[in-house]
Amino acid sequence: MILPQDTYLRLFGVDRELLDRLVAAALSEGGDYADLFFEDTSYRDLLLRDGVVASGGSHIDFGVGIRTLKGEKTGYAYTESTDAASMMDAARAAATIARDAPETGPYPTFPFPGKPNPAADRYPVEKDWRTTPAKEFLPLLERLEAIIRSRDSRVSKVIAMLSAQQSNILMYNSLGELKYDTRPCGTIAVSVVFSDGKSQQNTHVSRSFRCGAEMLSESLLQELADDAVRNLDDRFAARRPKGGQMPVVMGAGASGILLHEAMGHAFEADFNRKEQSIFSDKMGRRVCAENITIVDDGTLRGNRGAINVDDEGVPGQRTVMVDHGILTSYLHDRISARHYGVRPTGNGRRESFRYNPIPRMRATYMESGTDDPQAIIASVRSGIYVDEFANGQVKIGEGDFTFYVKSGYLIENGKLTAPIGDINIIGNGPEALSDIVAVGNDGKVDPGAWTCGKEQSVPVSCGIPTVLVSKLTVGGE
Amino acid sequence: MENIPWSITEAEISLARRCVEIALEEGASDVRVSLSKSLMDLVLVRDGSPDKVSRAGDRSLTFNIFADGRYGTFSVNRLDGELMRSFLHDAVETVRMLAPDEFRRLPDPSRTAKNARTGLELGLYDPSYASLSPSERLETACGASIFATAKPEGCRLISEEIEYSNSIYDNLVIDSRGLEARHIESSFEIGCETTIADARGNKYSGYWWDASPMRGDLSTSDVCAKALQRAMAQINPLPHPGGACTMVVENEAAARLLSPVLGALSAFSVQQGNSFLRDSLGKKVFADGFTLCDRPHDKGCSGSKLFDSEGVATSEAPIIEGGTVRQYFINTYMSGKLGMPPTREDAMRPTVLPFRPDGAKEGSFGTDEILALCGEGILVTGFNGGNHNAATGDFSYGVEGFAFKGGQIVHPIRGMVITGNMLTLWNNLIAAGDNPRRGAGKQVPTLAFSQVEFSA
């Protein structure tokens, strides 16, 4: 949602003259670039537990972050007050980097980031979270619990949470660029504990979108309930497979965490300009098979990773990182774009005004291939199929990654057989990429509430079609 | 408190007290207000020269509001007296929309802390903090670097990133029943991440850190050398067949295995049936040698605190004693829900006590001694991803470290996974060292477990 410019200036109590004075203060020690990031975030949450919505609240976060750059060196300070004196103090604190950092200039100019298109608002709001009374939401959470309980008698406990955030953002920089945006984000999540009298199982499902309260509907609740009880008999029956190296078929959607952790982070340009990434010397080279194209996309309407502009005022865009197997782009913020002499890709993101922006993913996914998903499974003599992940982690330098698999199945002679769960799969990013031997035609972006935790937390999403990795290490008995 | 930078001012304390009054005037039956301020100065040095300086000053007011048998939580970082009336009015109105919950109440005043008046009682504030200048901070961080002088054999030093920070945290908790408790601590931290490449271009990274509430106790001189050493030690990993073997987990990494146990002791998890330790109170479910205590009153030590987030007084108490569960973490709300006496919201400074299977009473008992005792197995020095199932205790973690034989490290391992169950794992505890990292909030030493399943 993009409001008139004056709305943001009034909200933060600033005008162009004050913005220019702040930028001048931030550059007063010799910095070559400065920017201001104003944020006004309101957050509401409601929690259903033990059958009632008996907990909730609201939170306000307000402030401005001021950054000074000298070459690739960063000075950063913020204040929770937008009175001129507090902001001047913060600007002078950020400015000190230029005094402390060694002189290594002259620095190249910043590539023009492109103009945002206000008409291409990626998250219009029909029903504003801030003005919709909380009492409208209470019955929805109660209804969600009722639907889940009606689906299976083994439901023991249900915790359902609705959270809604809306941020007004104003950005200004020493290039004279003034950008603004209003970002909604609504999340509904439910954790369920099931008991069959002998053992327990738990699950957690969520949906998260950049849109207003219009996202809440009966069909969304039904969808969440479907996911919560899906394959429940198999969850109770799940066992750990025998461990070792084997073919792994990744189910479409949430398996996109593989891309995010194992490859996406290593494509972030800060790791590459510091030569820490395993991909730092592979630009323009083949990193996987020709049928693989990997994208990081900030333009998906209503997606949790969508942005009209990033947190440096660079327009949101779609960035092809791997084009038919060739590494074609890193994910850039302004610093790394200047380092590499390319246009920033709109990946400069931050958790809040408390953090300086760094290259971060948005919605990262692999484009669909041509293989039939069932044929992919049928091609595996002995391996596993995985379709639900809890989390993952990667070591950027080494490229080693680990994913925790909540559920999946053994593949025996081309057929899904015994259910499996609570295992890790482990591998190496570049090796796993080059070991992808089949890409399904069923690509999809997972609608869950994914959050990336690289130094700071930002909302992201991920997706993938069904893929076959010829060998990964599976933890088992 | 005038000489403590960024500490809570008298005006801010008055505002917090006034907020209690306003909330009651607006219809709350009870209210708790937590006023927090923190200041952090950070210097990041990359490859020997400053890369980033930052200053972060935060303050916030958090309200736990009880009204008409209902409850809500609210926070704001704009400490503007004029805004508070409307904010608290809206907050109370929101609470009144929620369903009643008979167990929501403030803790009984007899249980709240009476000995945290100044916030300085635990000696966690370093008076020299106020005199630390930006240039000293920069000199400390740059002075720790070995990027220009290190000449590692058999590899190339790609990057060295040092993060040095000093911070102040000041927290005041008051409530409408007379609670007033304060906690002030300073913290000095340094960490170094080093990335190297071997002769074939394979990259490895190593990390080391130190932290202390006292500036003089911080060890900065060897942090980069240790990070480099840890990166170099990983060069040329060899395959390991896996299978069930003895696992020694270095003190640097061992807290990862304690966290699921602490989570399972939370009354919230127990009440929700999402704990592998439900129905375990008073029962012996772990190995004889597993004793875990909370030591929140250790003066000058990270993690120590005289009160929990409800303002309830903390105490030195066993949590697990000789393998028997002695305590769940039960706050006021969960006490009502479970019909059990309240304890504390959480462990503040959980400490695993040493356990020597040989019964020896003297001499240090660190990683080297435990490796010697175990003879052969895998030394885990870090975890790479993984998770556990809170309801069942089943876990699976990626691990990195070294194979050892005859008590000596023989080669690095890579790409291995451990799987098992938390109850089984801690039942197979065969040794606990006396070497927890000083600056860690969770005091977990090097641990050894038998019969851990490794996959490769």
Image (cartoon, grey):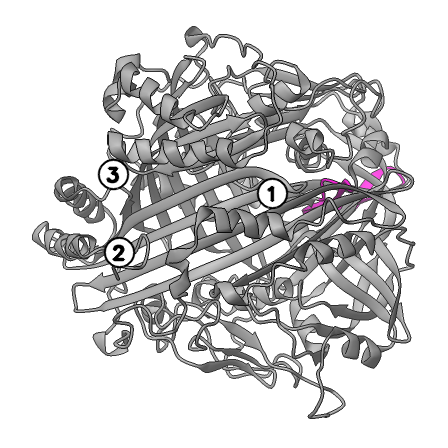
Whether residue B310 is situated above or below residue A74 in the rendered picture: below
Residue B399 at least partly seen: yes
Q: Amino acid at mark 1?
A: Val
Dot 2 alpha-carbon crowd within 10 angstroms: few under 14, some 14 to 19, many 20 or more: many
Q: Is residue A32 left or right of residue A8?
A: right
Dot 3 alpha-carbon crowd within 10 angstroms: few under 14, some 14 to 19, many 20 or more: few
Residue B397 at least partly seen: no
Quarter of the rendering occupied by the C terminus of chain A: bottom right
Of tags 3 and 2, the one toward the viewer is 2
Residue at position x 46%, y 61% from top? B272
Does dot 3 land on a helix, a strand or a loop?
Answer: helix
Spot occupied by residue A152 in the image (x, y as percentages of width and height): 52, 49
Residue at position x 79%, y 16% from top? A324
Chain containing the residue with disc 3: A
Q: What secondary structure is the stretch in magenta mostly built from?
A: strand
Does dot 2 land on a helix, a strand or a loop?
Answer: loop
Chain containing the residue with disc 2: B
Q: Amino acid at mark 3?
A: Lys
Residue at position x 85%, y 69% from top? B377
Where are the magenta residues, as a range?
A: A395-417
Spot occupied by residue B347 in the image (x, y as percentages of width and height): 46, 70
User: Does B366 lie within the magenta span?
Assistant: no
Chain containing the residue with disc 1: B
Lower position in the chain sequence, tag 2 or tag 1: 2
Q: Nearer the viewer, residue A129 or B159?
A: B159
Quarter of the rendering occupied by the N terminus of chain A: top left
Check disc 1 and report the residue beneath it.
B45
Residue at position x 56%, y 45% from top? A229
Check disc 3 and report the residue beneath it.
A135
Spot occupied by residue B56 in the image (x, y as percentages of width and height): 40, 43
